Image (spheres, helix red, strand yellow):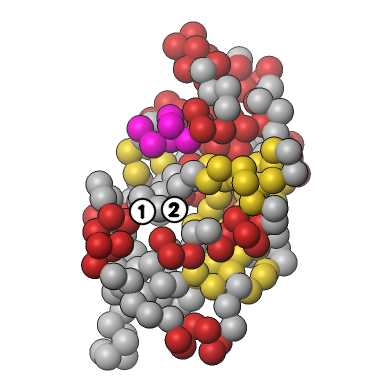
Amino acid sequence: MKSWDAFLSDEEREAVAELSSPFKIQSLLDTFIYSPDSFYRCPLRVLRERTAHCFDGALFAAAMLRRIGFPPLILEMLPNERDDDHLLAVFKLERHWGAVAKSNFTGLRYREPIFRTLRELVISYFESYFNLAGEKTLTGYTAPLNLRIFDSSFWMLRDEPLERIADHLDTLRRYRILTQPMEKRLSPVDPRTMKAGLLDSNEAGLYCPADPASGA
């Protein structure tokens, strides 16, 4: 962690020192601008630019969780082909899982550490995981990835290793939470849930599914 602190200004060091709990990390992430960019920012750049999308936010949260004694774990939530994936920084407290996340959707952010398994944690996001067509899209998740395996490439300080981290997520074991019959029976998202979920969202960062009727 000394290598990280050496790159911080006094003001940045003071800001990071305030992040003494997962919820405080989430609270800081919530003040950052949601990024519609296709490129990745390392945790140091996220802190300096105060901008992140879900990938950047999960890595930043994992780095900050590491500072307070948690391993830097991220988990990818997997939708069907009509939506974007979403990353969480996950942590375990008293044998129960919680999560910190940056999202363009209100309901896809923090979770208290009350879930006995990662499956329970992921399922808690199900009703809030939907696309702009009002379809519930979450279908599975990956095993968690400990970012310590990328320490030699200084992922907390440099953007260059982040593509390799993204590629590595594709190699992780995947778990489904829905069967195909379950997917077919899903009801549409109601208008109030849609409105609440999109509160203060950045339109430029929203995934737009193709119209199934158009064949696009």
Viewer-proximal residue among 22 and 41: 22
Q: Position of residue 207 (x, y in %)?
A: 34, 64
Seen at 55% across and 50% down, the residue is 88
**What residue is at 55 percent from the left and 87 percent from the top?**
180
Name the residue type under label 2: Leu
Give the side of residue 74 with respect to residue 105, left or right: right
> Residue 139: x, y in percent?
54, 73
Would you call the spot at circle 2 few (<14 residues within 10 Å), some (14-19), or many (20 or more)? many
The residue closer to the viewer here, 129 or 114, is 114
* Residues shaded magenta: 26-31
In the image: residue 90, left or right of residue 130: right
Q: In terms of image quadrants, where is residue 52?
A: top left
Q: Secondary structure at mark 2?
A: loop
Identity, as a three-letter code, of the amino acid under mark 1? Phe
Placement of 145 over or under 191, stated as above or below: above
Q: Is residue 73 visible?
A: no
Q: Position of residue 48 (x, y in %)?
A: 42, 26
Q: Residue 181, located in which quarter of the rendered image? A: bottom right
Q: Is residue 180 visible?
A: yes
Q: Main secondary structure of the magenta part?
A: helix
Label at residue 108: 2
Picture quarter with the N terminus: top right
Mark 2 and mark 1 residues within 8 Å of each other at the beta carbon: yes
Residue at the (72%, 66%) spot, across then down: 173
- Residue at x 61%, y 15% (from the top left corner): 6
Q: Is residue 60 magenta?
A: no
Q: Which type of secondary structure does the marked residue at label 1 adopt?
A: loop
Q: Quadrant of the C terminus?
A: bottom left
